[in-house]
């Protein structure tokens, strides 16, 4: 059962209690590097993304907003940060390196968890020139990288990081697609691994936060941006549950629910963290969830921070209080 109180007191400046984890959700920064792009880099789907950047996205996704975000995170100081994909725009090697620098500005790999988005897999790219730059931000806590361990998306995901009683479960839905398509897929192998993780962390009575780029609920994005195996994922969650699902990809605020074995699961999507926003719904935001255990479940304080173009900084937008019962 989920209940919301829109009149909850402001929590952004309050100290975090010892039994509470403050989790910030950031998504879709779209860090671009198109000034020195080579012609041969555009002999594929990147040409479509490059033209979109030149026509309108370059004026929409601003480095100044990401700088304001970094400044605001210093003030709010969450315990952990989850980034749900589309760190790059054209999956260029220079963009992966710039995204690595941006991640380092947010915090260490133990404090920041990353999953890829479809723009990070815009085209098939050599691992060492792309995701290798973020490996330590994506790996599970217990992953031992050795001579016999092959680093790739299939070996890393789903990922599991446990902070206190909070289980951060990362799923990768990113895959190269044809032009004009931005679909994603969990895939059969990853789905089976996810089933085992959800079952185990559920038995441990952890608060399970599923991090995914493509929204699993229907109606959030168009057909060409859909999660192809969303129905299978919803069926899995109906059986094994999760306490919260965070996604990106939609580039607007989104909230819905999925059915779980013990009630509804909140599904929340944030806009791009770098977006000036043609409408208020699309303006850059990030969310801070303050999660603490309660006698019969969990309490979640939700603070939403929105970018103010007039002030060139992030400001409080809303405060909510959620209660989840087992």
Image: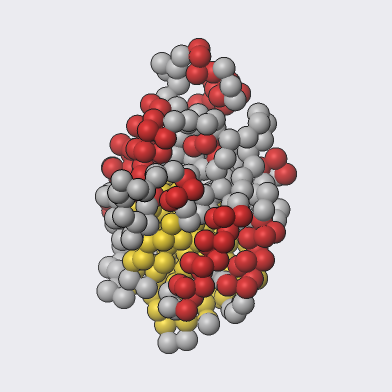
Rendering quarter of residue 311 = top left
- Residue 156 visible (yes or no): yes
The location of residue 284, given as percent across then percent down, is: 48, 44
Q: How many marks?
A: 0
The location of residue 277, given as percent across then percent down, is: 54, 39
Residue closest to the eye, 272 or 191: 191
View extreme (top): residue:
39
- Residue 9 visible (yes or no): no
The location of residue 157, given as percent across then percent down, is: 47, 53
Rendering quarter of residue 282 = top right
The location of residue 184, given as percent across then percent down, is: 61, 45
Say whether residue 11 is left or right of residue 276. Answer: left
View extreme (bottom): residue:
295
Q: Which residue is painted at 57% across and 55% down in the image?
A: 189
Asked if 264 appears above or below 106 in the picture, the reply is: below
Rendering quarter of residue 142 = bottom left
């Amino acid at each position: 059962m989920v209940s919301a109180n829109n009149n909850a007191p402001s929590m952004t400046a309050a100290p975090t209690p010892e039994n509470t984890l403050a989790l910030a959700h950031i998504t879709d920064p779209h860090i671009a590097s198109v000034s020195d792009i080579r012609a041969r880099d555009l002999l594929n789907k990147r040409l479509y993304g490059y033209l979109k950047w030149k026509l309108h996205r370059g004026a929409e996704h601003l480095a100044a907003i990401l700088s304001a975000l970094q400044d605001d995170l210093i003030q709010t100081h969450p315990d952990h940060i989850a980034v749900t994909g589309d760190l790059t725009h054209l999956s260029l090697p220079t963009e992966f390196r710039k995204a690595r620098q941006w991640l380092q500005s947010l915090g260490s790999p133990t404090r920041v968890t990353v999953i890829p988005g479809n723009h990070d897999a815009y085209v098939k790219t050599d691992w060492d020139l792309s995701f290798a730059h973020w490996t330590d931000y994506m790996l599970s806590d217990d992953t031992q990288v050795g001579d016999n361990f092959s680093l790739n998306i299939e070996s890393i995901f789903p990922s599991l990081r446990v902070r206190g009683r909070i289980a951060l479960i990362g799923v990768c839905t990113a895959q190269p697609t044809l032009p004009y398509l931005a679909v994603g897929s969990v895939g059969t192998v990853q789905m089976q691994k996810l089933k085992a993780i959800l079952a185990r962390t559920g038995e441990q009575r952890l608060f399970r936060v599923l991090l995914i780029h493509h929204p699993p609920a229907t109606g959030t994005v168009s057909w060409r941006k859909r999660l192809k195996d969303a129905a299978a994922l919803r069926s899995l969650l109906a059986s094994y549950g999760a306490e919260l699902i965070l996604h990106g990809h939609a580039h607007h605020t989104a909230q819905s629910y999925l059915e779980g074995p013990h009630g509804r699961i909140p599904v929340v999507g944030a806009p791009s963290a770098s977006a000036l926003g043609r409408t208020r719904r699309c303006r850059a935001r990030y969310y801070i969830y303050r999660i603490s255990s309660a006698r019969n479940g969990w309490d979640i304080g939700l603070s939403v921070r929105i970018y103010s173009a007039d002030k060139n900084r992030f400001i409080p937008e809303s405060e909510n209080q959620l209660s989840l019962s087992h």
